[in-house]
Image (cartoon, helix red, strand yellow):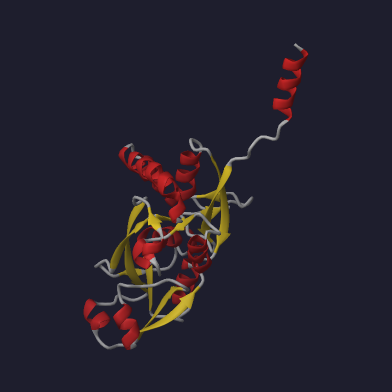
Amino acid sequence: MRNNIWLISLLFSLPQASAETFKVAIYYPQVPPYMYAANDNVPLGVVPELLNAFFDEQPYELEYVFENRQRAELGVYSGKYDATVLAEKWTEEPDALLFTQPIVEHHDYLYSLQPVTDEELTANSNHSICLRRYYKYTAFSQQLSDGQLIRLDSDSEFDQFNMLVNGRCDLVYMNEHVANWLINNHFPDTQFYRNSVETDKADLTLALNPKWAALKKRLDAYIREAHRNGLIDRSLARHMRKKPH
């Protein structure tokens, strides 16, 4: 009997194995409605909401790290981070990463303070365009290379619109969801013009380090179900209305 009690005591005194951490790099500056921080730096948005629900059912501890776009991508290659938000078409080494099912499909447009015709855009007019630093833009790489578009880099989408409003560039290229959120929350009194034809479209996906191939299968299934039951659509609509405080 004493031996049994001693054995039970020993089992309870042994250190419990901690869950393996899954570290996600999310962008800072922030990108509402997809990912942004509350006052206490708790990540909010469509992506954290989806991941929080998924990892509640997984044997891993989810951890978020705010990081800039370039370091986030490099960190997933090196294994410093396990995942980040990244479209395959914008990745330097897509074959080195695993990409999930699309979380959100978005369209990208050109925005300006004055109407700009398609003829003006295709003419050799040397428009200046505000873009995100470290981002690769396949939709008009040739125009940038030829000098038809003059690239000015900014650190956030908010800065892109701010530069446009202050006359530092002629055009802004931006994802429709982020643009609408910024216009509604930060530039409600400014008249922006959106080019009528989408310049590009992309899928918002997670890029994973290849060591997580087995987990990716479960995450893909979860994303498909979240689309089927409307979870992602409801989340996007809610965060489009919500302004961080």
Q: Let me know if residue 230 appears in the view.
A: yes
| Left or right, residue 163 beside residue 228 | right
Name the quadrant containing residue 114.
Answer: bottom left
In the picture shown, does residue 22 fall above or below 3?
below
| Residue 156 image offset from top left, x and y in percent | 50, 68
Name the quadrant containing residue 123.
Answer: bottom left
Question: Residue at image x 36%, y 45%?
Answer: 220
- Farthest residue to the top: give it: 1
- The quadrant the N terminus occupies is top right
In the picture shown, does residue 20 fall above or below 71?
above
| Left or right, residue 82 beside residue 205 | right
In the picture shown, does residue 4 fall above or below 65?
above
| Residue 219 image offset from top left, x and y in percent | 40, 44
Q: How many marks?
A: 0
Q: Let me know if residue 148 appears in the view.
A: no
- Farthest residue to the front: give it: 3
| Residue 133 image offset from top left, x and y in percent | 47, 74
| Residue 222 image offset from top left, x and y in percent | 38, 40
In the picture shown, does residue 232 fall above or below 201?
above
Question: Residue at image x 38%, y 80%?
Answer: 170
